[in-house]
Amino acid sequence: MTSPILQVDKLKMYFPVKEGILMRATRFNRAVDGVSLSIRPGETLGLVGESGCGKSTLGRCIARLYKPTEGRIDFEGTDITQLSGKALLPYRKDIQMIFQDPMESLNARHTVGDILEEPFIIHRIGSKQERTQKVRRLLDIVGLPARSVTRYPFEFSGGQRQRISIARSIALNPKLVICDEPVSALDVSIQSQILNLLVDLQEEFNLAYLFIAHDLAVVKHISNRIAIMYLGKIFEEADGEAIYQSPQHPYTESLISAIPIPDPRKRIRREVIKGDVPSPINPPRGCSFHPRCPKVIDTCHVEQPSLRTLPDRKLACHLALDAVSTTS
C-alpha cells in the first residue's frame, strides 16, 4: 500500500477570545481540537460536517494559511507546522487550495491572464512567453476559451469563475489540493460539471484531494474515504461505501438520512437531530455531541470517546464501541 502523502497528527487550532478592558485572552475558540487523518497520493478524503464544526479551519491549517496551535502536519515526511517564510515556499507549490467563493478569492482588479500567471512569477518559473503558453494551456484544461485571458472575474458566471480558481490551483502541478466546499455556491447542474472536472484532473495529474463539504451526497460522488467531523473532532472515518451502507455514529446516521431521495414513492426514516452545534468556546463536557444525540447514554455526559481503529473504520462513540465489544 502506498505511503500517505499527508499525515496529520493530533492537530489543534485554538483562536484566543480577547475580553475585558485589557482585551486579554481568557478563553479560546477550539476550532480544531486534536484531529488526526491521512491522505495517499491520488486519493480523495471527503471531510463532512455541519457549518461551524472546523472543516475549513482544518483545511487552512494543512495549507499553512494558519499556524496550528499544536500537533503535526507531515507532508511527504516533513513536519511543515514549524516552517515559515522561505522554508515554506517549496511546499506552497505542492499544496494548493480551492476556496468556496471564487469571487472573493480572485482579484477583481486583475485579468484572468494575470491571475493565472501570478503563481509562475512568484516561483520564478519560465519566461514571459513560456508563462503565456502555460496560462493558455490551463484555460484549455479547465474548459475555458483562450480569449478569457483579457477578461476580468466579474465578466464570468459562478461556474466559470470556479474553473478559473481550479486552473490557478493546478498551475504549479501540486500533489495535494484542498477543496473547501468548491461547489456549494453553485447551481446543481453546474455542481456536477465542476465535480466531473475535478475527477478528470485527478486522474490526469494523480492529484490527492481533501474535499470539504457539508453535503454527503456531493462527497459520495468524489471521495474514496469519508471522515465525519463535529465540533473540531473526527467522529467516524471509513470507506465511502461503508459510511453510506452502515454508519455507526448517530451523527453520521443523521447526516445520511438527510440526503434527499429522488424517488417520491420511496419512504425512509429520518434521524433528525435537534438543536445547533454548541459553541467551540465552551464545548459540552464528555462527548461534544451528547446534548443533541438521540442515543445518548450516561457515559457520554462525562467522558469524551477516543477515536478507535476498528476492522473497517475509525470510530469515536461510546454506544457503538460498547456494541462492538459485546459482539466480539
Image (cartoon, rainbow, N blue to C red):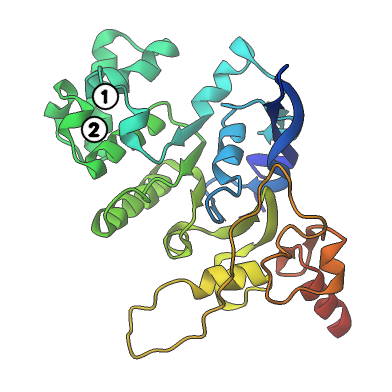
At 74% from the left and 50% from the top, the residue drawn is 283
Which residue matches tag 1? 135
Q: Is residue 60 above or below residue 215?
A: above
Q: Is residue 26 left or right of residue 249?
A: right
Q: Position of residue 191 (x, y in %)?
A: 31, 54
Q: Position of residue 99 (x, y in %)?
A: 42, 37
Residue 139: image tag: 2
Residue 265 in which image quadrant: bottom left
In percent of the image, x 51 and y 75: which residue is there? 257
Residue kind at label 1, given as amino acid type: Val
Q: Nearer the viewer, residue 4 or 287?
A: 287
Do callouts 2 and 1 mark residues in contact (Cβ within 8 Å)? yes
Helix, strand or loop under label 1? helix
The front one of 20 and 29 is 20
Mark 1: give few (<14), some (14-19) or many (20+) Cα within 10 Å: many
Confirm whether residue 253 shows in the render: yes
